[in-house]
Amino acid sequence: MKKATAEIIREYGPFDGVENVGGVSFDGEQVWFAAGDRLVAFDPDSGNTTRTLDIAAHAGTAFDGKHLYQIAEDRILKIEPQSGRVISTIPSPGGGRDSGLAWAEGSLWVGQYRDRTIVQIDPETGKVLRTIESNRFVTGVSWVDGELWHGTWEGDESDVRRIDPQTGEVMEKLEMPQGVYVSGLESDGADRFFCGSGSANNKVRAIRRPKRSRA
């Protein structure tokens, strides 16, 4: 297993009126995060808030290229981002105990915090298709370039780790500095991960994604 200290590139926030930063996603231009009673978007270059949707947003957030998905208590909402309209809902697999959320390969991937699992579900029905075990509390979830990453937050320790999607084995770990925690997690598809901070200090942090050899 590769192990390194996470390199924090930038911090965004704290955000006005936000008490908790939950799920985090990226739509190619804006970073979205769950703030309890609303979804907030900001420009990752300027740091300026660009959108706010008044919608229940309690945990993981995901984007499929067209729609946002948001965990709201025991449901997952499918949202039209321009209007903020909820198009459909499905039950969340954890019944309200869910954490992270990601979109990949036509499926939603849902973190189950205290169960230490990530479940793949059908985005139309909510049917569980596969369960991947972890050995830590799972917060945010992200797929990038065929790699499965998730955040952890257990006790006073937090990290971002890459796991084998078949076995759950930890392949790589980026350890957060003491007192810095990870709630939501999403990649920008390039060299950054965006990490929520829960209620610790109401920020989103960008950390550097490890480079890959092209050999």
Image (tube, rainbow, N blue to C red):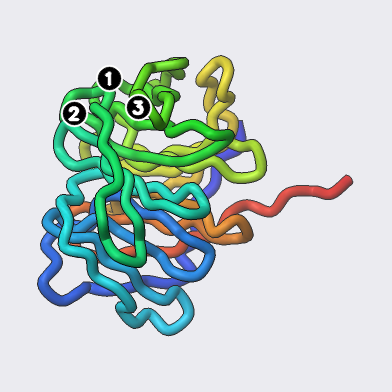
Please give the residue where the numbered disc 2 appears in the rendered image: 97
Residue situated in front as seen by the camera: 187 or 56: 56
Which image quarter holds the C terminus? top right
The residue lying at 44 percent from left, 64 percent from top is 206
Vertical side of 202 occupied by 3: above or below: above
Q: Number of numbered discs present?
A: 3
Q: Which numbered disc flags the more N-terminal residue, 2 or 3?
A: 2
Is 26 on the left or on the right of 94, as rendered?
right
Q: Position of residue 149 (x, y in %)?
A: 50, 38
Q: Which mark is residue 127?
A: none
| Amino acid, disc 1 | Asp
SS type, badge 2: loop
Please give the residue where the numbered disc 3 appears in the rendered image: 136
Q: Position of residue 12 (x, y in %)?
A: 33, 73
Which image quarter holds the N terminus? top right
Q: Residues within 10 Å of mark 2 (few under 14, many from 20)?
A: some
Q: Residues within 10 Å of mark 3 (few under 14, many from 20)?
A: some
| Amino acid, disc 2 | Arg
Mark 1 in CB contact with mark 2 (< 8 angstroms)? yes
Q: Distance from label 1 to label 2 (Cα)? A: 9 Å
Q: Position of residue 57 (x, y in %)?
A: 20, 50
Q: Distance from label 1 to label 3 (Cα)? A: 9 Å
| Amino acid, disc 3 | Arg
Please give the residue where the numbered disc 1 appears in the rendered image: 115
